[in-house]
Image (spheres, rainbow, N blue to C red):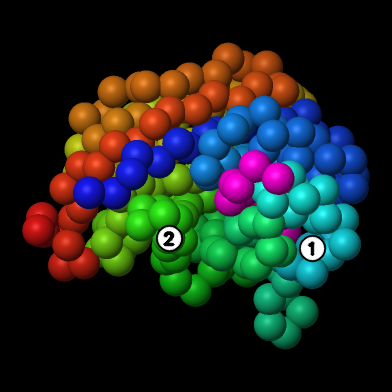
């Protein structure tokens, strides 16, 4: 049996385009979480600023997050615009631990004005932590059943996402999460942006949550920024790569 996994969802304060300051805030959230994995919202390092410059995994401004992860033994899943081939940009997830960072996933399903600024990512992705397989998603990905299905087909224990939604739409995240949990019998976690940001989001949803495989909320933040909540994930039967149970 695997050890339980402590997973947190964070909704840090964010300043538009200020990667250095936001990275310091992310580092504080990692330390406060005391979790093995900390999930952050979509584009959390820059804000939902569609013109933000891409951030390489070797960017020196990530150093505070790397240091915090090394200190507490965490993996941080951080939202940022990341470079792609041919000068394209993607909405990405950076996996940051005590040794550095790498681009772990590029958002596949773009919404709103995003296609004018970003290219879609090529494929689903999973990160493995202490024997737990975490499928990665970003915002609109979670509303596409095909994305959850293709990610679950890789063999996952949890489906974790960073998101930006308006305050009026916060219930949409819950609907999607319950559907994914029911369809694939996995934990679901959404780190949801809190506080004002770009792209017309003057009032974002917050309310980051973690659902168990029965679709029950086991941890929930309020709408305000600066909050981290966590849950201890225990092992359900993992779906096999063909989508069945083993």
Q: Indicate the position of residue 135 as horizontal and vertical percent values.
A: 40, 55
What residue lies at 10% left-to-right and 55% top-to-bottom?
245
Q: Residue furthest bottom?
A: 86
Report if residue 173 is visible in the image: yes
Q: Secondary structure at mark 2?
A: strand
Residue neighbourhood size for the residue with mark 2, other residues' Cα within 10 Å, grouped as few (<14), some (14–19), many (≥20) = few
Residue neighbourhood size for the residue with mark 1, other residues' Cα within 10 Å, grouped as few (<14), some (14–19), many (≥20) = many
Q: Indicate the position of residue 176 as horizontal and vertical percent values.
A: 35, 36
Most frequent secondary structure within the magenta stretch: strand
Q: Any magenta on residue 92?
A: no
Q: Secondary structure at mark 1?
A: loop
Query: Disc 2 versus disc 1: distance between alpha carbons?
Result: 23 Å
Among the 4 quarters of the image, the one containing residue 101: bottom right
Specify the label residue 246 is tagged with.
none
Span colored in magenta: 71-81
Task: Work out whether mark 2 precedes mark 1 in sequence or the reverse, and give the earlier one.
Answer: 1
According to the image, label 2 marks what residue? 128
According to the image, label 1 marks what residue? 55
Among the 4 quarters of the image, the one containing residue 85: bottom right
């Amino acid at each position: 049996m695997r050890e339980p996994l402590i997973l947190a969802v964070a909704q840090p304060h964010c300043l538009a385009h200020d990667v250095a300051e936001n990275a310091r805030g992310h580092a504080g959230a990692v330390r406060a979480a005391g979790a093995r994995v900390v999930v952050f919202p979509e584009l959390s390092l820059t804000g939902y600023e569609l013109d933000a410059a891409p951030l390489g995994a070797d960017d020196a401004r990530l150093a505070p997050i790397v240091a915090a992860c090394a200190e507490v033994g965490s993996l941080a899943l951080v939202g940022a615009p990341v470079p792609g081939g041919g000068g394209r940009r993607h909405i990405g997830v950076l996996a940051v631990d005590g040794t550095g960072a790498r681009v772990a996933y590029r958002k596949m399903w773009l919404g709103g004005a995003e296609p004018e600024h970003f290219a879609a990512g090529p494929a689903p992705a999973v990160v493995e932590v202490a024997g737990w397989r975490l499928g990665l998603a970003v915002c609109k990905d979670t509303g596409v059943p095909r994305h959850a299905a293709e990610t679950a087909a890789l063999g996952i224990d949890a489906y974790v996402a960073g998101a930006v939604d308006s305050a009026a739409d916060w219930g949409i995240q819950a609907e999607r999460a319950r559907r994914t949990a029911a369809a694939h019998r996995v934990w679901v976690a959404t780190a949801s942006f809190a506080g004002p940001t770009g792209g017309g989001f003057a009032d974002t949803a917050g309310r980051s949550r973690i659902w168990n495989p029965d679709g029950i909320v086991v941890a929930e933040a309020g709408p305000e920024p600066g909050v981290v909540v966590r849950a201890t994930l225990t092992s359900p039967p993992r779906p096999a790569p063909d989508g069945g149970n083993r």
